Amino acid sequence: MIKLSRHIVALGAVAVLHDAVASPVDLSNELPNFFGAGIGSTTEYAGGKDRIVGVVPGMRYVTSGGHLFEWYGTYAQYNFGNLTGFQWGPALALRLGRRDVDDPVVSQVHSVDTTLEGGGFVGYEYSHVGEVPYRLRGEVTVVTNAGVVYSGARVSLNTSAWFPVHSRVFIGGGLGATWVSGGFNETYYGVTQQDSAKSGLPVYTAGGGLNQITSWIAAIYQINPSWYAGAMVYYQRLMDDAANSPIVTQRGTRNQITYGVGIAYAFR
């Protein structure tokens, strides 16, 4: 049976998953250490409709003590828990900003700097090793940038499932949701009086709450014992105050789609 690792498909996602949850795509932990890269397309900024293409590196490394380090593009985490069962540890995410965008109106709205988010995650993974193996996983991640760019925090809930359809092919999917502080939404979706005077968009003050719901579907193919290829489509639907921002309703779209392909080399 094909042996897979968390997030190989995530290598196929562009590094600018602006409002993606910390771990949108994940697989079982049977694969040893690997490194890889992917290329993908996403919107230029959260809520926008213009698209860009990006490349993201990634790696996975199990320490001699049995702890797991993962780094995928703009996100990294270290698991102090078990490879299956209860998992927990610190998390870091690079949240890209909004600056010099193509849209002539949104470009007049206040720019947002790229910032580093820090926090942690807790989760649980169940792996079934019977005649038809599968895995189920849930995770909660909490991060903040301590007021450097936005105030408050971002909380994400993610679930995923993976099933084999062939000795070399796995398919997976997941659902998630993200809640944010009012300070987060105001930074990324608010329109100040000065912004309004420059851009012509109406003044808008965004509050906190449910920010988005997400879903994804992905596939992994084992090329040979060392090489794996993956593809994914990731969907985000902005909700509530984020979706109602004139940045989104007048110049963009609440439906955000990211897609990509990736390749990874496993080493033991």
Image: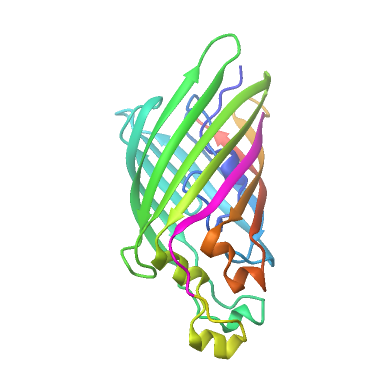
In depth, the one of 194 and 139 nearer the eye is 194
Asked whether the viewer can see residue 82, the reply is yes
Asked whether residue 56 is drawn in magenta, I would say: no
Q: Position of residue 214 (x, y in %)?
A: 58, 47
Residue at 65%, 38% in the rendered image: 217
Q: Position of residue 212 (x, y in %)?
A: 54, 53
Which region of the structure is painted magenta?
A: 205-221
Residue at 47%, 74% in the rendered image: 205
Residue at 49%, 86% in the rendered image: 193
| Vertical arrangement, residue 71 with respect to residue 244, above or below | above
In depth, the one of 126 and 214 nearer the eye is 214
Asked whether residue 216 is drawn in magenta, I would say: yes
Residue at 61%, 78% in the rendered image: 106
Q: Position of residue 83 (x, y in %)?
A: 39, 27
Q: Position of residue 71 (x, y in %)?
A: 45, 46
Marker count (numbered): 0
Quadrant showing the N terminus: top right
Could you say which quadrant of the image residue 256 lies in?
A: bottom right
Could you say which quadrant of the image residue 262 lies in?
A: top right
Question: What colour scheme does the image use?
Answer: rainbow
Residue sitting farthest toward the top = 131
For the stretch drawn in magenta, the main secondary structure is strand
Left or right: where does residue 138 sit relative to residue 143? right
Residue sitting farthest toward the bottom = 197
Left or right: where does residue 161 sit relative to residue 218? left
Asked whether the viewer can see residue 24, the reply is no
